[in-house]
Image (cartoon, rainbow, N blue to C red):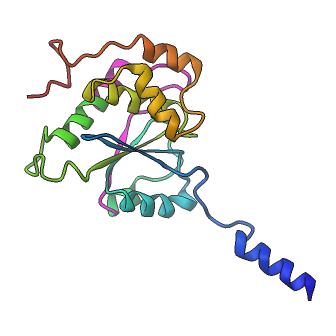
Amino acid sequence: NNNNNNNNNNNSASPPGALTISSKPTLITTPHLRFLIMDAPRQSNLHLYIKECRRNHVTDVVRVCEPTYLGSELLKAGIQLHEMAYEDGHSPPEEVLARWLRLVEDRFFGGGGSGGNANAAQNTIAVHCVAGLGRAPVLVAIALVEFEKMDPVEAVMMIRRNRRGAINEKQLQYLEGYKRRGGGGGCACVIL
């Protein structure tokens, strides 16, 4: 009888081969912005990530690593996939930064589409790299610096409070040296 109880306990916890989300996604919110930082879904557990995205009103997923799943399921769920991959351990290249900042502006400040600002309070952008600890949090930190006018260290501390282990020393140094573009000309993030 004791053996049966042990087997039942093991099955109720998590059966072998059960599909789960490796690392719980982290919601980062400010008065104007909502981001969901995640690790990379796999094709086998993508449906769980889609469920989590729906729960958090995700309109867009930004993939900053090599593909580990097909984007067609996201599109079927009404979520746009944006490919912004860049090399692990490096700072985001200018082209990725420009596209990222344009997406953030469009989603949260009504830079495009007929919806304008009406749904901006509910919009969430999910962003993931492989583990959700490096490239993805760096992009979120840059958005906080640009659009919430946070100090880079303050942005990193906010992310780390919610996502332990995020942003390594090299990435922190990059962010400490990051200069806001908001006031300058030729920027992709002009707020009218």
Vertical side of 115 occupied by 109: above or below: above
Nearest the eye: 178 or 106: 178
Q: Residue furthest right?
A: 2
To which quarter of the image does residue 54 belong?
A: bottom left
* Residue 24 makes an appearance in the image: yes
Give the position of the N terminus as an image quadrant. bottom right
Q: Position of residue 119 (x, y in %)?
A: 17, 53
Q: Nearer the viewer, residue 138 or 74?
A: 138
Q: Nearer the viewer, residue 106 or 71?
A: 106
Left or right of 111 on screen, residue 32: right
Rendered residue at 40%/57% (across/down): 53
Quadrant assignment, res 20: bottom right
Residue 94 left/right relative to 102? right
Q: Residue furthest bottom?
A: 1
Residue 66 appears in the rendering = no
> Percent from the top left, x then y, of residue 159?
47, 34
Number of numbered discs visible in the structure rendering: 0
**Would you say residue 98 sits in the magenta stretch?**
yes
Q: Is residue 94 magenta?
A: yes
As drawn, 95 above or below 184: below
Tell me which residue sits at (12%, 41%) in the image. 112
User: Residue at image x 55%, y 32%?
Assistant: 166
Quadrant location of the C terminus in the rendered image: top left
Q: Is residue 137 above or below residue 53?
A: above
Which residues make up the magenta segment?
Answer: 77-99
Q: Residue at x 32, y 23 (%)?
A: 95
Q: Position of residue 161 (x, y in %)?
A: 51, 36
- The percent position of residue 70, horizontal first and vertical second, equals 46, 53
